[in-house]
Image (cartoon, rainbow, N blue to C red):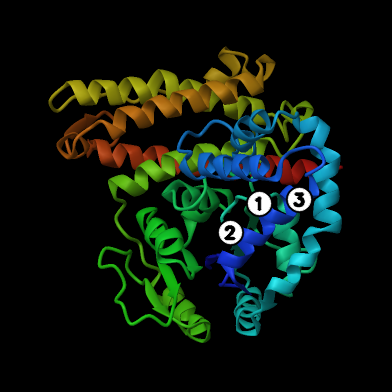
């Protein structure tokens, strides 16, 4: 079983990225020229895009980040422009199809992945709204209405953009990719290949360049043309590379896991967050309260102790009973989610300031025995993924039982 992440532009569709990136802002700003000077509009767009690209905090989607920068700069509210922007994507954006052409060899690779039962994710840089990505998939003859994608990235649901490694970890977490190999296919060395490698994901660099692959990419990474991808995927499937986690990939996974949880739970109405499948399974609200308390009362305290002591002792703590004792299902799940993310941000800041010696420091754990900070952080990443699967089971079962 594989999960395959695909870039879109110049990977699944031929696109003059430079020309497209000029025409698109021109068309959008001209469409609003009766309300905003086009130069002011475009500058506000570029500034908002820069804010999205540089975002490293978990809290808030890229759309929210863009909105905070863009709308004050043009002096209009989002509400006043929402219908106009929706009309643009319905009436004007489709004309940009003429700047693109489908890639038949990419369609064959997608068909091969489908025949194998592999998960497919569209990991395009999420600087566009979903409707724009959806239309470009149609232009590539890879319509999301005809093909089931595990994830399609867009600025409404993503918390990070390329080239942040956390972007790839977030997509990986959303498709529960920690349980089987995940790979990335893209054409851009600096936006796709290097950052996905930093996230611990093997990649295939689509290129005719004679330049060698960077030496520190994960095992199994390769390069070549789209026609070579099917053979590479078979190789990857057979060797199932399992790279030892690096500090960078663990930090990326801490961000990506929390971001994925934020996106997944917000995909359903909060009125369903307290619904339980049975007396044993936790509700979404109970899971979020558990994650919050574990992050704030256990993970943060443990890491602070580890960073302050030599060979510290860490006691195991039973937390399963807290759901009943603390009456999680009567608490505010949305507030718990925000507090969990705040705790995770604090944890990441502590870890980013820790040196390599601290990451490798020996710890005496009452359950796991001798371990290290690095290994304990990997346990947190695994814990995130277990609850992602639990949340998705809760959501999928509730949807099916309607």
Disc 1: which residue: 128
What is the x, y in percent for residue 268? 74, 37
**Up-down relation of residue 245 to residue 394 (above or below):** below
What is the x, y in percent for residue 59? 54, 30
CA distance separating discs 2 and 3: 26 Å
Sequence order check: which comes first, mark 2 or mark 3? Answer: 3
In which quarter of the view is residue 216 placed? Answer: bottom left
What is the x, y in percent for residue 36? 74, 38
In which quarter of the view is residue 370 placed? Answer: top left
> In front of the other: label 2 or label 3?
3
Few, some or many residues within 10 Å of mark 3 (<14, 14–19, 20+): some
> In front of the other: label 2 or label 1?
1
SS at circle 2: loop
* Nearer to us in this view, 356 or 9: 9
Q: Are marks 2 and 1 in contact (CB under 8 Å)?
A: yes
What is the x, y in percent for residue 135? 76, 62
Which numbered tag is attached to residue 124?
2
Q: Are marks 2 and 3 in contact (CB under 8 Å)?
A: no
Which residue is pictured at 76% across the width and 54% down the height? 131
SS at circle 1: loop
Which numbered tag is attached to residue 30?
3
Q: Are marks 3 and 1 in contact (CB under 8 Å)?
A: no
CA distance separating discs 3 and 1: 18 Å
Residue 283 located left or right of residue 173: right
């Amino acid at each position: 079983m594989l999960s395959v992440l695909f870039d879109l532009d110049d990977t699944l569709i031929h696109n003059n990225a430079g020309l497209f990136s000029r025409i698109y802002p021109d068309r959008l700003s001209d469409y609003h020229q009766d309300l905003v000077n086009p130069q002011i509009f475009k500058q506000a767009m570029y500034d908002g895009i820069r804010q999205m690209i540089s975002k490293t905090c978990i809290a808030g989607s890229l759309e929210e980040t863009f909105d905070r920068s863009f709308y004050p700069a043009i002096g209009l509210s989002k509400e006043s422009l929402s219908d106009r922007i929706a009309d643009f994507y319905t009436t004007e954006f489709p004309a940009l199809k003429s700047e693109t052409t489908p890639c038949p060899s990419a369609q064959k690779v997608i068909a091969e992945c489908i025949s194998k039962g592999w998960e497919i994710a569209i990991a395009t840089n999420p600087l566009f709204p979903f409707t724009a990505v959806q239309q470009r998939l149609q232009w590539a003859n890879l319509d999301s209405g005809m093909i089931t994608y595990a994830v399609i990235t867009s600025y409404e649901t993503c918390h990070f953009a390329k080239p942040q490694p956390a972007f790839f970890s977030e997509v990986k977490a959303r498709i529960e990719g920690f349980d089987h190999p995940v790979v990335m296919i893209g054409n851009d060395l600096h936006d796709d290949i290097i950052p996905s490698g930093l996230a611990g994901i093997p990649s295939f660099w689509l290129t005719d360049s004679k330049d060698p692959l960077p030496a520190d990419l994960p095992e199994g990474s390769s390069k070549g043309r789209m026609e070579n991808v099917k053979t590479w995927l078979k190789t990857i499937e057979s060797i199932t590379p399992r790279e030892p986690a690096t500090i960078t990939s663990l930090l990326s996974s801490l961000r990506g896991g929390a971001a994925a949880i934020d996106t997944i739970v917000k995909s359903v109405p909060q009125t369903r967050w307290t619904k339980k499948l049975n007396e044993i399974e936790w509700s979404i609200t109970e899971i979020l309260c558990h994650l919050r308390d574990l992050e704030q009362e256990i993970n943060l305290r443990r890491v602070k102790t580890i960073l302050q002591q030599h060979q510290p002792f860490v006691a195991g703590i039973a937390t399963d009973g807290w759901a009943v004792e603390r009456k999680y299902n009567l608490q505010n799940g949305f507030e718990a989610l925000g507090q969990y993310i705040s705790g995770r941000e604090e944890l990441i800041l502590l870890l980013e300031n820790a040196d390599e010696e601290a990451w490798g420091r020996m710890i005496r754990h009452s359950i796991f025995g001798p371990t290290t900070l690095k290994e304990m952080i990997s346990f947190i990443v695994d814990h995130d993924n277990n609850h992602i699967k639990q949340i998705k089971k809760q959501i999928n079962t509730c949807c099916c039982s309607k």
